[in-house]
Amino acid sequence: MHINQEPIIATSYIARLGDEKNRCFLSKKSLFIKYKGRLEQFDLSDIQELNFKHKLLLLPLILGGILAPFALLALLKDLGNPWLLLSGMVLGILLIYYGYDGTPTLSIATKVKEFDFFIKKPTPNLLAFSKYARQIFTFGEKGSFFYLKVTNDLAEEHESKAQLTFSDQCRLSYYDEVFRKKNEYFVFDPLLLGKHFELMTEEDKIVPVISGTVSGEYIRIEHS
C-alpha cells in the first residue's frame, strides 16, 4: 500500500474495525490521519508529540455558560414562562456538564500547532500504532525495527545454521525498551519478516511477536 507515493509500514483504524473513513497510516517519513473521510499528512520530522488526551468541549461550555445564568435571572425576575425558563436553565447546566466532561482525543503536536482528533476511546490497536509511530519520529530508522536480546542458544543457532527458530511466539521489544541497556540484540525489520511477524493481545495490550524459522538474511546483530 502507498499513499502519496510513500510505502505504508503500519496502519490502524481509529475506532471501529473496517471504518475506512477513520484510519491512521504510517510511512517512514509521514503520519497520515484519515478522519471523517478527510486525509491529513504530517511530516514525522515536524511532530513533537503524539498522545491521547482528554479535552474540554468549548462550544457546549460557552453556550451553557450563557444560557444557564440568563435563564436563572429571567426566572427570578419573572420575565417569562417559568417552565420554559426552568427548562432553559437545566439545559444550560447540562451543556456545561457535557462540555466539562469533555472527550478523549488523538492529539498531534507539531512545531506549528496542535491537532486534535476526537475519538470515543483509544483502542488497543490504536495504542500500539501510536507507540510504534513515536518510536520512528523519536529515534528515526532504529525505531522502525524490533529487537530481541541475544542469548547463548540463539547466538549458536544463528552462527551455525544462519537462522533462528521459534517454536512458540516470542515477544519482541521496541527500541525505547532496549537502547539504554548494554546488551547485544537481534534486529528485525517487520517489513521483511512476513508471516513470521505479527501483533498479539497480551493483557489488553497489542505486542509484537515473532515465530517460526527466520532466515539469517533477515537478521542482524547490534549493540544497544
Image (tube, rainbow, N blue to C red):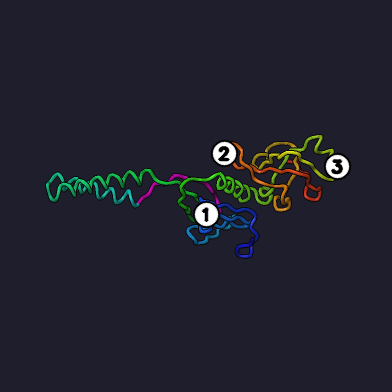
Above-or-below relation of 117 to 205: below
* Image quarter in which the N terminus is found: bottom right
| Residue 209: % across, % down | 68, 42
- Report whether 128 appears left or right of 149: left
Asked whether disc 1 touches disc 3, contact meaning CB atoms under 8 Å apart, the reply is no
Quarter of the figure with residue 180: top right
Alpha carbon separation for disc pair 1 and 3: 46 Å
Q: Residues within 10 Å of mark 1 (few under 14, many from 20)?
A: few
Please name the amino acid that badge 3 sits on: Glu
Q: Residue furthest right?
A: 160
Which residues are the magenta region? 47-58
Can you tell which mark lies on residue 111? 1
| Residue 42: % across, % down | 55, 58
Q: Identify the residue under disc 3.
A: 159
Q: Secondary structure at mark 3?
A: helix
* Image quarter in which the C terminus is found: top right
Above-or-below relation of 137 to 167: below
Q: Secondary structure at mark 2?
A: loop
- Report whether 89 appears left or right of 214: left
Mark closest to the chain's N terminus, 3 or 2: 3
